Image (tube, helix red, strand yellow):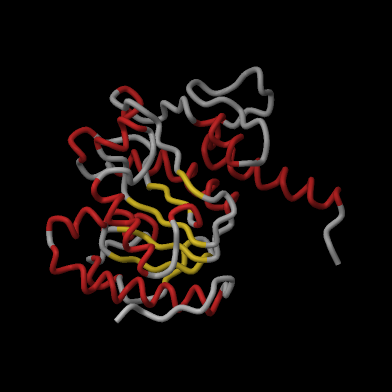
Amino acid sequence: MPDSPLETLFADSRNYLEYQAEVYGPDLMMESERGVPGVRPATKSSLDGLLQSIQDCDRCGLAKTRTHFVFGVGNPSARLMLIGEAPGEEEDRRGEPFVGAAGQLLDKILSAIGFDRSEVYIGNILKCRPPGNRDPLPEEVESCMPHLKRQIELIGPKLILGLGRVAAQNLLGKQAPLSRLRGELHSFNGVPMMVTFHPAALLRNPDWKRPVWEDVQRLRKLYDQRVGDKPGWNPPK
């Protein structure tokens, strides 16, 4: 039996307050006019509302060095979500994830398993570029992770692909090398998740293209088993 409008309202309100509590912790304030410096209250339960509420975020030092806040891009109802590490130089300049050479390679990888970029949603662990493309600091991940969790909750993907060591380790809470994490089915907040090498790593080390191809073939097969909304697919010879 479908939820009543009142039940839906209660569920949306609960999810919103849980997100606010995770972001603000003991500083959560119920009166919107009191607010929290650097983060405006969300205006609606949607990706647009989330973006409006966090696009001026200054919860970590990266707010001072970013050119653009890189929220994410793609189908807001995507069944498949891809999560990388953080924006690079080109992404920071344009305000969109995976738009440089690594993004072009990612588009080719998606196409090889029958997906168009417009069908999926692409985001990162961090929404601001670390200077010099260094690894994200633990406090930066801690500050940004609640935003990503809320983003995932709103999109509701059926499957997540983590791209690269940093994304895999932070999403899974494990310090194991990527070579040990790939090839297995994991879970992030109840969503099935797989991991593979970051496209940028393939540009530096072409020998990893074969393992990535193996990983994304498994991903497509798992997608067909769990979602099954795409035409039949056979790996290219």
Viewer-side residue, 216 vs 54: 216
- State which quarter of the image contains the C terminus: bottom left
**Residue at the image point whose x is 33% and y is 39% from the top:** 139
* Towards the viewer: 218 or 234: 234
Above-or-below relation of 181 to 105: below
Residue visible at 33% across and 78% down? 236
Side (left or right) of 118 relative to 197: right
Q: Tell me the residue at 22%/53% (across/down).
A: 200
| Residue 229 image point, x, y percent | 59, 71
User: Left of 172 or right of it: where is 225?
Assistant: right
Farthest residue, direction front: 237
Total marks in image: 0
The N terminus lies in quadrant: bottom right
Q: What residue is at 29 percent from the left and 51 percent from the top?
A: 104
Residue 226, horizontal then vertical, whole percent: 55, 75
- Residue most toward the top? 33
The picture places residue 173, in percent across and down from the top left corner, at: 36, 59
Whole-percent x and y of residue 212? 27, 69
Relative to 87, residue 171 above or below: below
Is residue 153 positioned above or below 21 on the image? below
